[in-house]
Amino acid sequence: ELAHLKALLAKNENVLPADQIVHLFDIAAEQHFKNLRGLPLGKKYLLCLNPDFILEIIREYMVNTSSQPIEPGQTLDPCLRKASGILEQLTRAVPGLLEGLFLLAKVKYLSGEMNEAKATLR
């Protein structure tokens, strides 16, 4: 969580360019999931998972993406790719997390995966 606070501080103080701030959020996400490795899916895992913390990181990724879906042939924005991977893990572990499902559908939509976005919302 310290890496996350460092990223938030850099963002709020406007001392680093956006790509470096995103990198700090990458580090925060990597460290968070590293702490979950080896834990069996259960009560302790879900407590350590901290879905609200993960959603905060995802929201920061979403700030740095386009609000329009990509066109066929365009490369996928790295923030969308990262958000998708994290949200897939999160929604598998916590399938009833509505905000997580909504954000996953939004990421799929922005990635040009319209059918997957619709399926996520069902």
Image (cartoon, grey):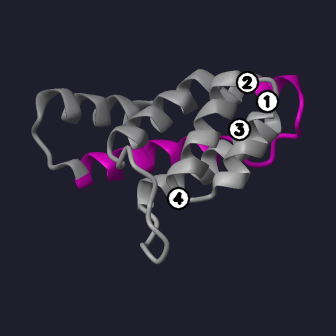
Q: Report the mark closest to the observer, 1 or 4.
A: 4
State whether residue 22 appears in this view. Answer: yes
Which numbered dot is residue 81?
Answer: 4
| Residue 72: percent from left, percent from top | 49, 72
CB-based contact (under 8 Å), mark 1 and mark 3 = yes
C-alpha distance separating marks 1 and 3: 6 Å
Quadrant of the snapshot with the C terminus? top right
Q: Give x and y (percent) for residue 55.
A: 55, 29
Q: Is residue 7 highlighted in magenta?
A: no
Disc on the earlier residue, 1 or 4 = 4
Q: Which stretch did the figure color magenta?
A: 19-46
The answer for how far apart the CA atoms under marks 4 and 3 are is 14 Å
What secondary structure is found at the residue carrying circle 1?
A: loop
Q: Is residue 83 visible?
A: no
Local secondary structure at mark 4? helix
Q: CA distance from mark 4 to mark 2?
A: 20 Å
Q: Report which residue position mark 2 lands on.
A: 97
Marks 1,2: beta carbons within 8 A:
yes
Q: Name the residue at the bottom extreme.
A: 73
